[in-house]
Amino acid sequence: LVGGGGGDGAETAAVPEGCDENEWEEAEHFNTVVNCFGDYLPYIQTDITRREEAYENLSDEHKDLLPVEKSYPGKINLLKKAALANKAILDKIAGSIPKRRVSVRSSSATPGSTLEPPGNTNKMHNMDKIQGTLHLLARDWSSLYASERNQSYGMLLRELEKLKPVTTLNRNKQEVLIPGVGLGRLMVEGVFRGYQCQGNDFSWQVLLAGRYLLNGNLEPQQVPIFPWIDDPGNRVSNSDMMECVLIPDINIKAELKKLEPLSRAPPKMSVTAGEWVDIYNRPINKDRFEAVLTSFFLDTAPNPITYIQTIYKTLAPGGVWINFGPLKYHWQPSVATDPKDYDDPRYGESLELTLDEIIETAETVGFKVVRAPSLHSCTYASNPNSMNPTRYNAAFFTLRKPGGLISIDEASDIPLPNDDPTAQ
């Protein structure tokens, strides 16, 4: 038995004779991810059944105290219909890409033969990612959450346009890197503004969902989803939990088509999958990008110093790093967890730097501060009707790699050699 790919700790089937172990492991992990889209319905139905049984176990006295016009059984039936609507989009995402197969290199095998690793099923640790993907579909691709997107994406894009303005000559030519690209909305908005954008993400769940949206040629508001049915707590009314969100808010392909006459260079975007530090430390990516945009990303690092160094390496001289997000530190272990019980070594590597330490470390690496950090209140993939929305004071800052050309806005802030700021 070999460990499941992607560090999820799942066990895989024995590797068949003639199959490369690494190829089999990677394909097994990928097929497990595809399977988990199909596992959503039994997962959510288990929770709905729990709520239904809790009601059935009430005494008749307690049942009679509940409001008749908003019957609990009626709510359960609505939840079941909402779960089916979510299943429909998840099935389409999973069906939009074939499962992976592995070549069999054996003297007894038919030339060109392949095998499909079955992938694991009912892995509950993958269900949080699927439910999170539904939350992100609402955040990134519905009109209802445009204001939340503007809190982060809007600030990043306005800063990008200020420091790396698009002209007739450079339209669709300035390369922008977006690690942690998720479902791709920030990348698409960058392309709309005339930048050549490349995203990266490690989560196959969001990568596959983003791929379906970007390539599915969906009409505006074509797909209904119910992103909040997994969480019945902190609701003012049933309608809060049962909110129907229509996605996408735009026809992505049609909007991109409108951009083609604006430049000889066509609009261009791409996505890479995998650990971004490994990918972007390759020589081909050195001094490549005019800007790196990080949104709710910096704190996904076990060691943020590696992120800072990688961003610096990928930026072209004069390139800018524009950041927006908190420092939640996803790999920070619970103080109650014994280190020997960590199920991933990255918990033991977690380095929780303060914002001041982040900036000072970046300056030591070589960055120059263009915009000092400021804090901005925002939400992230949060139901606005919740009684307990998750709210952050996110850090917004801009750093520049020395060299190259700088914008007029930056140049206006730099004193000339003979300037005396104290002169009358």
Image (cartoon, rainbow, N blue to C red):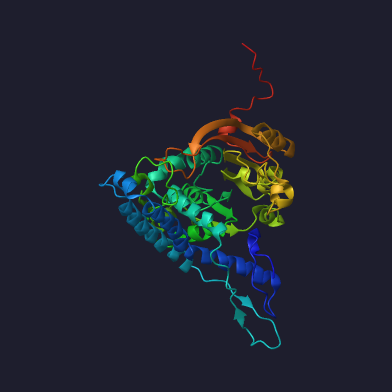
Q: Is residue 218 visible?
A: no
Q: Give the quadrant of the N terminus.
A: bottom right
Give the residue drawn at x 57%, y 30%.
374
- Residue 378 position in % (x across, y down): 49, 36
Residue 226 lies left or right of residue 108; in this view the side is: left
Q: Give the quadrant of the C terminus.
A: top right
Give the residue drawn at x 65%, y 50%.
288
- Residue 218 position in % (x across, y down): 38, 60
- 307 vs 265, nearest the viewer: 307
- Displayed quadrant of residue 233: top left
- Residue 371 position in % (x across, y down): 60, 32
Q: Is residue 380 above or below residue 412?
A: below
Q: How many marks?
A: 0
Q: Is residue 237 above or below residue 215?
A: above
- 386 vs 214, nearest the viewer: 386
Q: Is residue 50 above or below residue 116?
A: above
Residue 321 lies left or right of residue 42; in this view the side is: right
Q: Which residue in the rendered view is the most extreme toward the left?
A: 69
- Displayed quadrant of residue 369: top right
Q: Is residue 59 visible?
A: yes
Residue 136 lies left or right of residue 179; in this view the side is: left
